[in-house]
Image: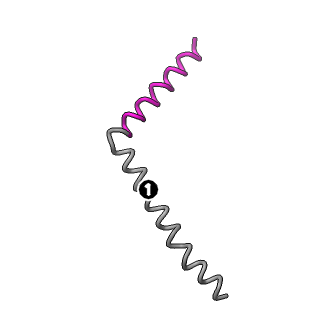
Amino acid sequence: MEFLLTIIVYIIPFIILYLVIAAGVRRGIDGSDTGRALRQKLLEEEEKRKSNKNK
């Protein structure tokens, strides 16, 4: 029982840390100029594919 509790105590902080870092990176990329440029480029490529399918 003590072994299981020890594992839980050590794993939960790493899971929380992972979630915090992932959210921070996602927000950081989305809010940056580079993130906006990437998003715009992806939208342009998607529009090109859609227009090529319609032809």
Quick one: quadrant of the C terminus?
top right
Q: Residue at x 65, y 82 (%)?
A: 4
Determine if the magenta segment contains residue 41.
Answer: yes
What is the x, y in percent for residue 10?
Answer: 55, 77
Is 45 positioned to the left or the right of 1 in the image?
Answer: left
Quick one: quadrant of the N terminus?
bottom right
Determine if the magenta segment contains residue 52.
Answer: yes
Looking at this rendering, what residue extends furthest in the bottom direction? 2
Q: Residues within 10 Å of mark 1 (few under 14, many from 20)?
A: few
Q: Secondary structure at mark 1?
A: helix
Q: Residue at x 39, y 50 (%)?
A: 27
Q: Residue at x 63, y 88 (%)?
A: 2
Looking at the image, residue 8 lies above or below residue 36: below
Q: Residue at x 48, y 61 (%)?
A: 19
What is the x, y in percent for residue 48?
Answer: 50, 20
Looking at the image, residue 43 lies above or below residue 29: above
Q: Camera-side residue: 45 or 51?
A: 45
User: Which amino acid, mark 1?
Assistant: Ala
Residue bounds of the magenta highlight: 35-55
